[in-house]
Image (cartoon, rainbow, N blue to C red):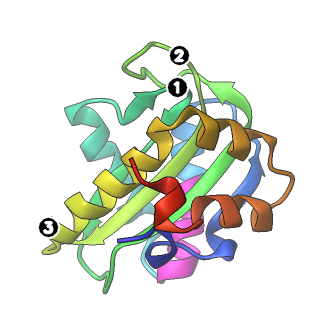
Amino acid sequence: MDLSDLLNVEAIIPAMRVTGKKAALQKLCERAAVDTGLDARAIFDAVMEREKLGSTGVGYGVAIPHARLEGLDKVSGWFARLDSAVDYDAVDDEPVDMMFLLLAPDAANAEHLKALARVSRFFRRENQRNRLREADSAAAMYALLTESKDRNAA
């Protein structure tokens, strides 16, 4: 699975202005609602239920909020780079400035886990994170996120 299977350039918010974790999640869920046709509140509630199990702030300024929802027909993603980092209760206690929202159909257990692993692998690489932070547009971010598997592997 490649990240190009999960998102398109319209699913990228290059400079999202928010004041905290909850606001960031709400804004990203609202964007996902526009693209999926699902209710923004239902998406937000599902994401917050997952957050109750443990923060999806994976470290290095990155969060990968995710949830499974009825009504989706495929695993999909949305990426946002925040204007300024927000406290997110991340595993490394560092603030988050990049978020990748991942939503999957309720019954898509294996696909959800594969997508989550793929996104996690991408963000583990410091050079990928740095390049995303330096990118100047949604198109540039999309190109970085969807580069060939060869360059993103590991």
Left or right, residue 42 beside residue 14? left
Q: Position of residue 62 (x, y in %)?
A: 52, 35
Q: Position of residue 100 (x, y in %)?
A: 50, 51
User: What is the magenta range?
Assistant: 28-36
**Contact? badges 2 and 1 (CB < 8 Å):** yes
**Contact? badges 2 and 3 (CB < 8 Å):** no
Badge 2 is on which residue?
Answer: 94
Cα distance, mark 2 to mark 1?
Answer: 7 Å
Of tags 2 and 1, which is closer to the observer? 1
Secondary structure, mark 1, is loop
Secondary structure, mark 3, is helix
Badge 3 is on which residue?
Answer: 110
Q: Which mark is residue 13?
A: none
Left or right, residue 147 beside residue 53? right
Q: Tell me if residue 8 can be seen.
A: yes
Q: Amino acid at mark 3?
A: Ala
Secondary structure, mark 2, is loop
Q: Amino acid at mark 2?
A: Glu
Q: Nearer the viewer, residue 151 or 146?
A: 151
**Contact? badges 1 and 3 (CB < 8 Å):** no
Q: Position of residue 129 (x, y in %)?
A: 61, 39
| Farthest-out residue, top | 93
How busy is the neighbourhood of tag 2: few (under 14 within 10 Å), some, or many (20 plus)? Answer: some
Cα distance, mark 2 to mark 3?
Answer: 30 Å
Above or below, comparing residue 14 to residue 39 in the picture: above
Above or below, comparing residue 62 to residue 140 in the picture: above
Q: Nearer the viewer, residue 94 or 51?
A: 94
Q: Is residue 78 magenta?
A: no
Badge 1 is on which residue?
Answer: 60
The dominant secondary structure in magenta is: helix
